[in-house]
Amino acid sequence: IDDVGHKYHLELVLEDVLDKDSTVNCTAEVLYHLGNKNIAPAVQFTIEGELKNTDEADNIFYSRIKSLEKELVAENIPDSHGSVSPEMEPIRLLAQVASGYVIWQNSTENTKFQLAQIKHVKQVKRSDDCLEFDYMILLHEMVSQEIIPWQMTVLWHPQHGVQVTQDSCQPKHALE
Amino acid sequence: HQVLRIKTRNEEEVQKLQLLESLEHLELDFWINPSTPALPVDVRIPANSVQAVKAFLESHGIAYSILIEDLQVVLDKEKQDMAYSQQRDRSSNSFNYGTYHSLDSIYAELDHLASEYSNIVSKLQIGESYEKRPLYVLKFSTGGSNRPAIWIDAGIHSREWVTQASAIWIAKKIASDYGKDPSLTSLLNKMDVFLLTVSNPDGYVFTHTTNRMWRKTRSKNQGSRCVGVDPNRNWDAGFGGPGASNNPCSDSYRGPSANSEVEVKSVVNFIKNHGNIRAFLTLHSYSQLLMYPYGYKCTEPADYAELDALGRAAAGSIQSLYGTTFTVGSICTTI
């Protein structure tokens, strides 16, 4: 679109990562802005049908974290061999969702990001009902092949969903 | 979910349990149905109904014990055990092909394979890495002299661990399937296979000791703090072109000049000296892509039609095993 950018019309199928047989059709429009690469691409989408209800699993996870005596701390999820312990699965899934937001905000037509690993995660005490986690994640960018450390603060509540309240790209040597 | 074992003492108690069975909203799953007082009754109870059921049993004085406190824990452990034993099934003697290994462990297994299958497997050294680690190639051959050959390498990018692991498994399969699998047997009767299981041993060791995400070689770059060259941008084909960086700190740094990396030069020398290599395969992860030239330009190679047909046939074969899908195409159009 002259003077505006590139618009893509997409028809895609969403697949539940926890249940490969559960799929949902989706149509979307993505607009990459010309010029200013600091604006996230504009996205509009419609989903055919409903997403699965996850209340039971959400509440179990929520209760478990709420009942911990000390704030949760963990690192290297998955580990070098690709393993994730069952207790850390929800922590990883939460990071997957939150990193989706970070990736969206930082994507251009020439990037392809994937969450590679959670380097470190620390729960932050809160006075309200929400759970807060401070993550240091590694994003893999396919085109440049770079591994980019990224810090993100994630808020979550079973009824209120996920929110990334703060995120920032970290210098590469934060790794070594 | 809990599983309870209920000991009924008489017909009356059995009937009470049958009443419980009829209450559908409790969603009880009887593993052993109430039928006679002689047999225990085992029932799986969803979390929401546990309290109600226990209250019912206690108020009627019916004895029960907890068989399984939390069924999910049992299922999770079973899943872990199954994964573990699937790994063990793939192991022979002391080498577990179903798990990742250190460089030393892989190198030891190369020797083991060369000795166990000495009639068709031999180990060659084609050079040394920057940090002076040997570069070992396994040669699979049933004889002849300089037969047409297939080259396979893995681990050129050290963090792509599944490739080195796949390579050593491929070695095992080729060696053990010769004489059993018809197509492999006929292949080896006419052609040789050369397999470089760890193309970048310095990088591989670094991923174990220091940085799991290391990709490049470990060579020092003059005038820069940053270490390493992307060996897969160091070839003398379209060197310095698109897809490579001239920044030593980049993970796709092409290096000061083509073949500057000893790991790459060693492979080039081997291939050129052999003179009869007919196919060159290189393993990378991740993405499940099966690709042919070119990457640095978008023109079709001369044998495009054959390469594409071969790629599609291979992808079809791979899919037939476990349903794994690979996308086929040229590097330019696929990546």
Image: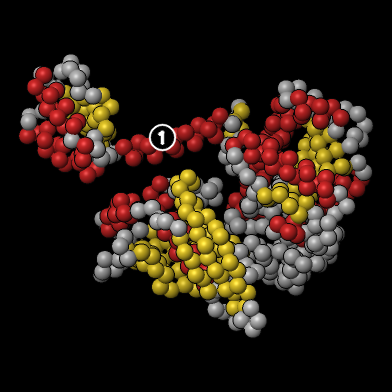
Residue under pointer 1: B78
Image point (59%, 34%), residue name: B96
> Residue B145's spot in the image, x, y percent?
93, 32
Image point (78%, 51%), residue name: B292
Q: In front here: B248 or A47?
A: A47
Q: In front here: A26 or B331?
A: A26
In the rendered image, is residue B132 in sight? no
Q: Residue furthest front?
A: A48
Q: Quadrant of the C terminus of chain B?
A: bottom right
Image point (15%, 40%), residue name: B52
Amino acid type, residue under disc 1 in the picture: Glu
> Residue A134's spot in the image, x, y percent?
41, 66
In the displayed structure, B150 sits above or below B30; it is below
> Residue A114's spot in the image, x, y percent?
56, 60
Q: Quadrant of the N terminus of chain B?
A: top left
In the displayed structure, B225 sits above or below B31; it is below
Q: Residue furthest bottom?
A: A3
In the rendered image, is residue B335 in sight? yes
In the displayed structure, A148 sits above or below B32; it is below
Secondary-structure class at tag 1: helix
Image point (42%, 59%), residue name: A94
Number of marks: 1
Q: In front here: A12 or B109?
A: A12
Graded by Cα atoms within 10 Å as few (under 14), some (14 to 19) or many (20 or more), the crowding at tag 1 reads few
> Residue B76's spot in the image, x, y percent?
39, 39
Subunit under mark 1: B
Q: Is residue A138 left or right of residue A159?
A: right
Q: Is residue B77 left or right of residue B236?
A: left
